Image (tube, helix red, strand yellow):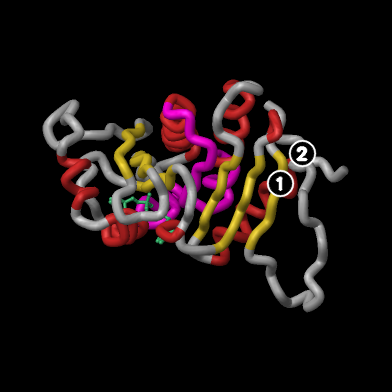
């Protein structure tokens, strides 16, 4: 894995109390990692990732916000995704893609993170949700993908463990995709400030200053 990159904007804000709301790091093969505080539903990217549930018919949190912003066509597209078991369109750790409809984002990649139990059981499932989302993005030739903090809301994943798993999984997936991989920008768009800060600190620990 080659997360080793440079923190692209190390500048200290003029007012030290001000927390920069966006940070940029380098990933391998020339890809960029952007960590920002904000609302994922307004992202202008090839795909936003939805932290969905196995039924894939909407819910609360980021799932509800994405469905509201995309309009009713999104739930109809989700309903058309075949069930793999009764009531299950997307098993935990897997991902499915639909158009973005009224969103600025061209696609929505729906994935399902685990309900947190413990690191040993939950981390592989969370890593799989990130890996399979990026796999779909790569298969569709997408360049930019925005993720929320999957499982960090009602699914109860501790922020520090979630950030570690998320950044490691993205790093590995882009490394494996190689130079020819389509994905050139991965964005984490995090709604709440403690989660944003945790992702920035985790990325800083991994990045090599140049
Ligand atoms: N933009 C970015 N992040 C957001 C937004 C937004 N507009 N709104 C909330 N978040 P959650 P989960 C953050 O609970 O834990 C749903 O009902 C939020 O602060 O949405 O994976 C599904 O249908 C948190 O950090 O998803 C499932 O049943 C993160 O998004 C279940 O919740 C994820 O919180 C999935 O639980």
Query: Is there CB contact under 8 Å for labels 1 and 2?
Result: yes
Residue 192 part of the magenta segment: no
Q: Secondary structure at mark 1?
A: strand
* Residue at (20, 50) in percent of width and height: 73
Q: Secondary structure at mark 2?
A: loop
Count of numbered tags = 2
Nearest the eye: 3 or 116 = 3
* Residue at (31, 42) in percent of width and height: 99
Number of the label disc, if any, that sits on residue 145? none
Question: Is residue 71 shown to the viewer in this render?
Answer: yes
Whether 3 is drawn above or below 20: the answer is above
Left or right: 129 as drawn, with respect to 179:
left
Q: Which residue is mark 2?
A: 5
Give x and y (percent) for residue 182. 55, 29
The region drawn magenta spans 140-165
Q: Which residue is mark 1?
A: 25
Residue 152 part of the magenta segment: yes
Give x and y (percent) for residue 101. 29, 50
């Amino acid at each position: 894995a080659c997360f080793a990159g440079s923190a692209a904007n190390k500048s200290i804000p003029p007012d030290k109390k001000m927390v920069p709301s966006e940070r940029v790091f380098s990933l391998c093969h020339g890809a960029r990692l952007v960590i920002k505080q904000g609302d994922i539903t307004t992202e202008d990217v090839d795909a936003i990732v939805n932290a969905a549930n196995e039924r894939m018919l909407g819910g609360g949190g980021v799932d509800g916000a994405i469905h509201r912003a995309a309009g009713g066509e999104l739930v109809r597209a989700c309903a058309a995704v075949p069930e793999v078991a009764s009531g299950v369109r997307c098993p935990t750790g897997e991902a499915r893609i639909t158009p973005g409809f009224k969103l600025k984002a061209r696609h929505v990649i729906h994935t399902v993170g685990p309900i947190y139990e413990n690191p040993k059981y939950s981390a592989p499932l969370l890593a799989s949700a990130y890996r399979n989302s990026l796999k779909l993005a790569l298969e569709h030739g997408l360049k930019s993908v925005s993720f929320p903090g999957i499982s960090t809301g009602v699914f109860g994943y501790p922020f520090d463990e979630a950030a570690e798993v998320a950044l490691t999984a993205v790093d590995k997936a882009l490394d494996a995709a190689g130079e020819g991989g389509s994905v050139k920008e991965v964005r984490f768009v995090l709604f709440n400030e403690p989660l944003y800060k945790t992702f920035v600190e985790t990325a800083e620990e991994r990045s090599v200053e140049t």
